[in-house]
Image (cartoon, rainbow, N blue to C red):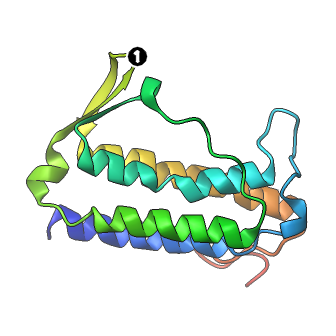
Amino acid sequence: MAIKDSLLAEFDHEMGTTRRLLERLPNDRFAWRPHDKSMALGELATHLSNLPTWGAVILKERSFDLAEAPPPLAAKTSTADVLAAFDDTVRATREQMDRLDIEYTAPWTLRRAGQEVFTLPRMAAFRTFVINHTIHHRGQLSVYLRMNGVPLPSIYGPTADES
């Protein structure tokens, strides 16, 4: 099996699961935050909606310098806006995933102000920055939703709300 096929299956599964969670966002709670140091619900949802863009960067470029990163996106203010942004970023990244194994195993470097932070095979960078990063923030979002009384969808099996 080609790396692409395995990565596509994993990407599609995790993005579908993430979308089901994003669909549950309560429009009237986007400013809510569990703690002063935490992102607001809308900020976290916006961040999640944008994470797939890392995939296209990793697959199209040989490196990325954090010093050249654009400023954080303004927080979306509705579920519809978050879902539209998420769908766009997922689609754009998925279009970039038709790669050969040699492209997935080629090195990709993260830099900060010209200094190398690390170099990984593109496949590992993709899993780390897109899939694992999404899973991490999806876990945060599931806690936010639970704390706001929102029933959770199945993630890796039935939830207490769907058993």
Q: Is the residue 51 above or below the residue 113 in the image?
A: below
Q: Quadrant of residue 141?
A: bottom right
Give the percent coordinates (x, y) of residue 97: 26, 63
Residue at 57% over, 64% down? 85
Residue at 72% over, 50% down? 75
Crowding at mark 1 (Cα within 10 Å: few <14, some 14-19, many 20+): few
Q: Farthest residue to the bottom: give it.
A: 163
Mark 1: amino acid: Ala
Q: Name the side, left or right, on which 94 lies relative to 38.
A: left
Q: Is the residue 103 above or below the residue 84 in the image?
A: above
Quadrant, the C terminus: bottom right
Check disc 1 and report its element: helix, strand or loop: loop
Residue at 33% over, 43% down? 125
Q: Is residue 154 visible?
A: yes
Q: Quadrant of residue 67?
A: top left
- In this view, the residue in front, 70 or 53, is 70
Q: Number of marks in the image?
A: 1
Quadrant, the N terminus: bottom left
Residue at 80% over, 47% down? 40
Q: Name the side, left or right, on which 65 lies relative to 42.
A: left
Give the percent coordinates (x, y) of residue 14: 48, 67
Q: Quadrant of residue 35?
A: top right
Give the percent coordinates (x, y) of residue 153: 69, 77
Give the percent coordinates (x, y) of residue 108: 24, 37
Q: Is the residue 3 above or below the residue 150 in the image?
A: above
- In this view, the residue in front, 8 or 82, is 82
